[in-house]
Amino acid sequence: MKAAVIRETGDAHALKVESDFPTPKLNPGQVIVKNEFAGINFIDTYHRKGLYPRDVPFVGGQEGGGTVAAVSEEAAAEGIKVGDRVAYSVLGTYSQYTAVPSEKILPVPEGVGMDVATSCIVQGLTAHYLTSTCHADLIKENEWMLIHGVGGGTCQWAAQMAKIRGYKVIGTCSKGKMDIAKKLGCDDLIVLDEVEGTSYEDYESVNIVERVMEVTDGIGCKAVVDGIGKSTVDISIAALARRGIFISFGNASGAVPAFPVLRLIAKSAYATRPKLLDYITNREELLMRSNEIFGWLMDGKLNVSVDKIFPLKEAAEGHLYLEAGKSKGKVLYKIE
């Protein structure tokens, strides 16, 4: 089968498309999905670079959507059938076929496109736990949440979900992504210059902390959702309210450097570094999150922006596009 494979970690060109990679075998409790789309996420680039180590060789990706091509007896007993439209998250989705444990399979409702359904899995589920659970209820309705990078993928979802949950939202975005960010319903939008020669936000171009304190009447934000990392950690901690929580979930600008816990004493603040797998620990939790997301989509409360679709043969170009900060929404591979 065709697959985008990493045999040696490195830059985007370490991602090589092979036409004869072994097709996965169907094991008990699994289904085989014929992929139509695979999502491209920053975590895929961390795997490719070796920041999050994996044994090589491996097929990239961890977000897919398509139709069921084969089912095990156990999966059939759960009602899964050949031809079902499904989406899922397991490792190895940059390929024509993926073996998926039946408990990871999410049925895609009629009326939800497969491109949108695939986009829901990593980014949608991540945004869901960021705004619903991992803040440990330290933020309540009508309190302020700062979300960095709302012009990009995951945080477009997060801004909308935060509003659905009744939080007041301050978003940051670059001038080049302002058109997208303005549609998300943020209560205040901090628009930043772009770093020269890139599409990335220049987080030094505006005094974000000063603006946050102005908007919140000097209180600060009860939660800060930060997928940027190195460039924003100081801003995020300084923008917190008393007993607020710093949620660091990504490294788009580089990994957050180690800092002494004593930094948090000024406001008795909290900090967490979550990952998706710890918030979908069983099928019940997975379905709770996905059903709520699909429901919001069908009710028109949530809008998904699919920014760009690359053919799988352009695997390296997809990673380069994401890493250059150009995306204004979800980036996908189309798999033929």
Image: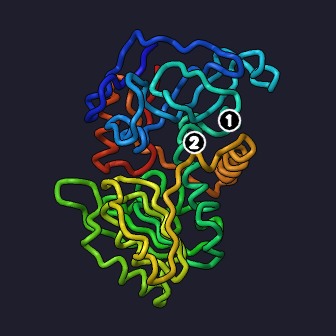
Which residue in the structure is indicated by mark 2? Answer: 121
Q: Report crowding for label 2: few under 14, some 14 to 19, many 20 or more residues within 10 A (C-alpha).
A: many
Chain-order first, disc 2 or disc 1: 1
Image vertical order of residue 293 relative to residue 190, above or below: above
Image vertical order of residue 187 relative to residue 174, above or below: below
Which residue in the structure is indicated by mark 1? Answer: 106
Image vertical order of residue 142 relative to residue 165, above or below: below
Q: Residue at x 53, y 76 (%)?
A: 244
Q: Quadrant of residue 139?
A: bottom right
Image vertical order of residue 97 relative to residue 38, above or below: above
Q: Residue at x 50, y 76 (%)?
A: 269
Alpha carbon distance from label 2 to label 1: 9 Å
Relative side of 101 to 309, left or right? right
Q: Residue at x 43, y 25 (%)?
A: 59
- Where is residue 165 shown, x and y percent of the image? 65, 67
Relative side of 81 to 330, left or right? right
Marks 2/1 in contact by CB < 8 Å: the verdict is yes
> Which secondary structure, mark 1?
strand
Q: Given the image, on which type of amino acid does mark 1 rest?
A: Leu
Q: Given the image, on which type of amino acid does mark 2 rest?
A: Ile
Query: For the view shown, which residue lies furthest in the bottom direction?
Result: 217
Q: Residue at x 28, y 47 (%)?
A: 324
